[in-house]
Image (spheres, rainbow, N blue to C red):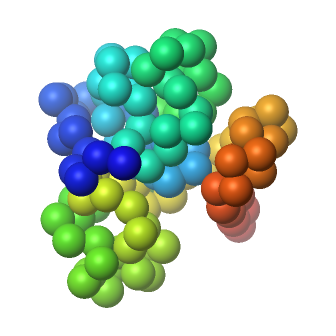
Amino acid sequence: MATTAQVPTSFGRELRACLRCRLIKTYDQFRETGCENCPAFNMDQDHDRVVDCTTSNFSGIISCMDPTRSWSARWLRISRFVPGCYTLAVSEALSEEMQAVCEDNNVQYVPPKHY
């Protein structure tokens, strides 16, 4: 696993958030390097998975330099992830196929809460 996630190269409409860990990067960054927290998704090898595993529909952004020591990272449940930019919430869930990938790789997936 990488020690730090890539920082988004722009903060416009091309931003996407990983549906599992909520890491934020641009579409092109996910295509080039995948998700540092979710290597089982293989987004850097199977580019169709970028659309399957990420969303542009999210709210809020937090940058976390040391997730293991941050109370906000613990509150957001990202304290075990690499330092980087994360969304506060996504409103979509992973597809059943990608949830099965998580299960096959013993990776915890917590679907978003709907209010």
Against 54, residue 48 (above or below) is: above
Side of 8 relative to 16 (left or right): left
Taking the spot 59% from the left edge, 22% from the top edge, the residue there is 49
Against 32, residue 74 (above or below) is: below
Q: Position of residue 57 (x, y in %)?
A: 52, 39
- Asked if residue 99 shows in the view, the reply is no
Q: Position of residue 26 (x, y in %)?
A: 32, 27
Total marks placed: 0
Q: Position of residue 107 (x, y in %)?
A: 64, 56
Against 74, residue 13 (above or below) is: above
Side of 99 relative to 89 (left or right): right
Against 76, residue 16 (above or below) is: above
User: To which quarter of the image does residue 113 belong?
Assistant: bottom right
Taking the spot 36% from the left edge, 48% from the top edge, the residue there is 1
Taking the spot 58% from the left edge, 38% from the top edge, the residue there is 40
Q: Position of residue 97 (x, y in %)?
A: 80, 33
- Asked if residue 79 shows in the view, the reply is yes
Taking the spot 31% from the left edge, 86% from the top edge, the residue there is 71
The quadrant of the image that shows the C terminus is bottom right
User: To which quarter of the image does residue 53 belong?
Assistant: top right
Side of 8 relative to 31 (left or right): left
